[in-house]
Amino acid sequence: MPGFHFQSENIMSSVTLTPCLAFDKEAEEAANFYTSVFKNSQVTKVVRWSKVAADITGHDINDAMVIVFELDGRKFTALNGLPHYTFNPAVSFQIECANQGEVDYYWEKLTEGGDETKQACGWLQDKFGLSWQIFPKELPQIMDDEDSERKERASAAMMKMKKIDIAALRRAADGQDV
């Protein structure tokens, strides 16, 4: 384009990418729940509805409109007032865990009150409808094994799991009964 010069390094240095989660009225409850699950987490700001906006949307001025929070140091925003939008598994958050103990912890916390029918292969949907993938950091190595038979056995075992059991996947990859 004549007269236009794009310098990506100048633009990219000023960009902040923050996931915004849309809720009807549960944003504050969700932010408080998520910050209780993840270490190094906190709600950093709560913006309440103004009288004008509350009157238009039907919210109470004491309700939260926007909540800014951090999960393990990563910034998120939760927004109330969007009842027509719902989460679906096309967007999910991945939690790569160091070991089975971490997998168990996050699975237990995030499945609490969630839909058990939406649990498969390390995926779950929490009580707010948000999807999560909880897996041990070793999983990609097992699932991409150069030995196609090991890979197939591990894949077959994983397809039967809800929560990932890394020891069972290792046994399956090795050809041991699981």
Image: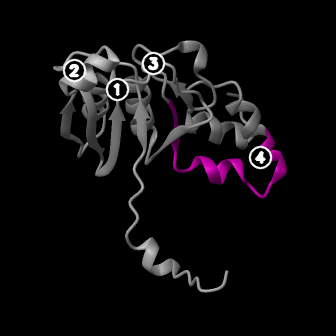
User: What's drawn in magenta, residue-wise?
Assistant: 131-152
Q: CA distance from mark 2 to mark 3?
A: 15 Å
**Which kind of residue does numbered mark 4 sit on?**
Arg
On the image, the x and y values in percent for residue 32 come to 25, 28
- Locate residue 54: give its quadrant: top left
Q: On the image, numbered disc 1 is attached to which residue?
A: 80
Q: Which residue lies most toward the left here?
A: 62
Q: Amino acid at mark 1?
A: Asn
What crowding class fits label 4: few (fewer than 14 Cα within 10 Å), some (14-19), or many (20 or more)?
many
The reply to whether the magenta stretch includes residue 133 is yes
User: For the residue carrying disc 2, how many other residues have a C-alpha within 10 Å: few (<14), some (14-19), or many (20+)?
Assistant: some
The quadrant of the image that shows the C terminus is top right
Give the alpha-carbon distance from disc 4 to disc 2, as whole Å: 53 Å
Callout 3: 10 Å neighbours few (<14), some, many (20+)? few
Please give left or right for residue 152 compared with residue 16 in the image. Answer: right
Residue at image position (48%, 28%) is 130
Q: At 59% across and 86% down in the image, what residue appears?
A: 3
Residue 81's place in the image compared with 93, above or below, is: above
Q: Nearer the viewer, mark 4 or mark 2?
A: 2
Q: Secondary structure at mark 2?
A: loop
Mark 1–mark 2 CB contact (< 8 Å): yes
Q: Nearer the viewer, residue 127 or 145?
A: 127
Q: Position of residue 84 (x, y in %)?
A: 51, 20
Question: Which of labels 1 and 4 is toward the front?
Answer: 1
Which residue does the numbered mark 4 point to in the structure image?
A: 150
Horizontal and vertical percent for residue 76? 35, 44
What residue is disc 3 on? 83
Whether label 1 touches label 4, CB < 8 Å: no
Secondary structure at badge 1 equals: loop
**Could you tell me the amino acid type at mark 3?**
Pro
